[in-house]
């Protein structure tokens, strides 16, 4: 039931705040992480020295996003790999490797095979999943469910923000078990996470109409590029994937720092480029670098659409459109920055008259390898 929305995707984007809030609910108390599903597993988390995150599609970008927080908080090296690539090489894994799988459906065959392969190799496995009782969690040593609610639209939206949230909780849990973060730092991180749902709601209230309007003007666009740095990089990839999936427009995401090593050759007058701008408060240096990337593409005629925090005036002289997100710590920005990109993809596909819920050639859950 679409509940009065024009599509399941529209409904599910509107549910992004609840997806985060419900995934957090009941999993912390007084600044301490308390994940009932992970009780009794302290030895498992104490005994690992490497984390490999495996997933496909949007879920893999949630993994790429969480890598930054996971490493920062736990000081355990984290790799992120597409499940089908991981499975068919000869990865170095063993009892001190933790393989974290991410899957909305819990049925993606590529991801399931990667988990089975990891277990056969002696690794420990944790599954991040949105579907109770699905196959992948059944094959794993532990499960942290995302509580995004059923996701019907093929292109994943609310599950994505819930996956990042669950991965952050898992990372905080692991740092708590291993003592790699102070109690204060963990309490602060939980506070930041708890503030996210209201901030996403703010974006939906303040920016949705604006984004849908200019997405409509862009219905004839043939290609869109997305640039981001640090945690903004996987968000650029996710923005591009969503656009490909539902609007059939060629889209690519790049690490902003890679611009001069290749992608800048693509910039010609009128080329739309989304740029995820990191907060100048959180990292003045990174902010400056991204603004200088914007200047470089703008000088070559790019049509620049920035996603930037409220009050960041440095981007104004070089931006054709400015999409504002509320202030948040650097690791939490992706949970906000992705929202305008989800709205944009949906707005553009709708303007083209496409079925946003059932894009051609795609299935919600791919149960073949
Ligand atoms: C694809 C879906 O086939 O599978 C994507 O079209 C999804 O939307 C990907 O991100 C992974 O699915 P799951 O269920 O494993 O998260």
Image (tube, rainbow, N blue to C red):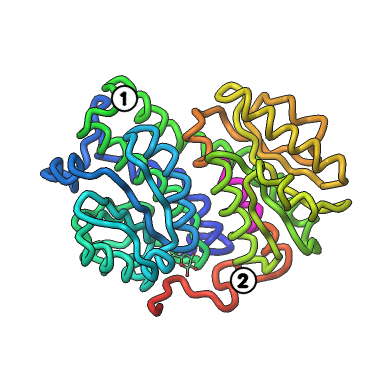
Residue on which the image places disc 1: 187
Q: Is residue 139 visible?
A: no
Tell me the number on the disc at residue 355.
2
Q: Is residue 218 above or below residue 85?
A: above
- Local SS, label 2: loop
Left or right for 243, reference 195 = right
The image quadrant in which ligand 1 is located = bottom left
Main secondary structure type of the part rendered in magenta: helix
User: Residue 330 vs residue 345: left or right?
Assistant: left
Is 261 placed above or below 359 here? Answer: above
Residue 224 within the segment the image draws in magenta: no
**Residue 312 position by quadrant:** top right
Instruction: Give the x, y percent position of residue 208.
Output: 64, 46
**Residue 313 location in percent, x, y?**
73, 25
Q: Quadrant of the C terminus?
A: bottom left
Q: What SS does tag 1 mark?
A: helix
Going 63% across and 57% down the picture, which residue do you hit? 240
User: Residue at position x 81%, y 64% from top?
Assistant: 220
Task: Specify start and end residues of the magenta stretch as a single range.
Answer: 337-346
Quarter of the view holding residue 82:
bottom left
* Residue at (33% x, 58% y) in the render: 101
């Amino acid at each position: 039931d679409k509940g009065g929305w024009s599509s399941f995707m529209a409904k599910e984007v509107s549910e992004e705040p609840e997806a985060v809030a419900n995934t957090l609910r009941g999993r912390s108390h007084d600044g301490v992480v308390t994940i009932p599903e992970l009780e009794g597993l302290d030895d498992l988390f104490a005994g690992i020295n490497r984390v490999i995150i495996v997933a496909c599609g949007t879920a893999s970008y949630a993994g790429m996003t969480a890598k930054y927080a996971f490493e920062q908080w736990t000081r355990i090296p984290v790799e992120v790999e597409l499940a089908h690539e991981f499975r068919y090489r000869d990865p170095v894994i063993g009892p001190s490797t933790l393989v974290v799988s991410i899957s909305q459906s819990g049925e993606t065959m590529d991801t399931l095979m990667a988990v089975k392969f990891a277990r056969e190799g002696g690794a420990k496995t944790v599954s991040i999943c949105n579907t109770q009782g699905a196959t992948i969690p059944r094959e794993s040593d532990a499960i942290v469910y995302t509580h995004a609610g059923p996701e019907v639209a093929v292109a994943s939206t609310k599950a994505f923000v819930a996956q990042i949230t669950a991965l952050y909780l898992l990372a905080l849990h692991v740092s708590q078990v291993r003592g790699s973060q102070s109690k204060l730092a963990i309490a602060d991180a939980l506070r930041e996470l708890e503030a996210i749902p209201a901030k996403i709601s703010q974006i939906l209230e303040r920016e949705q109409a604006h984004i849908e309007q200019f997405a409509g003007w862009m219905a004839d666009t043939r290609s869109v590029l997305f640039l981001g740095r640090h945690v903004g990089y996987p968000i650029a990839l996710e923005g591009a994937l969503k656009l490909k999936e539902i609007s059939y427009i060629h889209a690519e995401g790049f690490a902003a720092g890679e611009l001069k090593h290749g992608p800048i050759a693509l910039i010609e007058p009128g080329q739309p480029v989304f740029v995820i701008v990191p907060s100048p408060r959180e990292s003045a240096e990174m902010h400056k670098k991204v603004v200088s990337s914007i200047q470089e593409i703008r000088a070559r005629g790019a049509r620049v659409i920035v996603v930037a925090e409220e009050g960041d005036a440095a981007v104004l002289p070089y931006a054709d459109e400015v999409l504002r997100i509320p202030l948040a710590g650097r690791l939490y920005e992706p949970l906000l920055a992705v929202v305008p990109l989800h709205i944009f993809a949906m707005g553009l596909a709708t303007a083209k008259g496409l079925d946003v819920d059932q894009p051609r050639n795609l299935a919600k859950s791919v149960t073949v390898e």
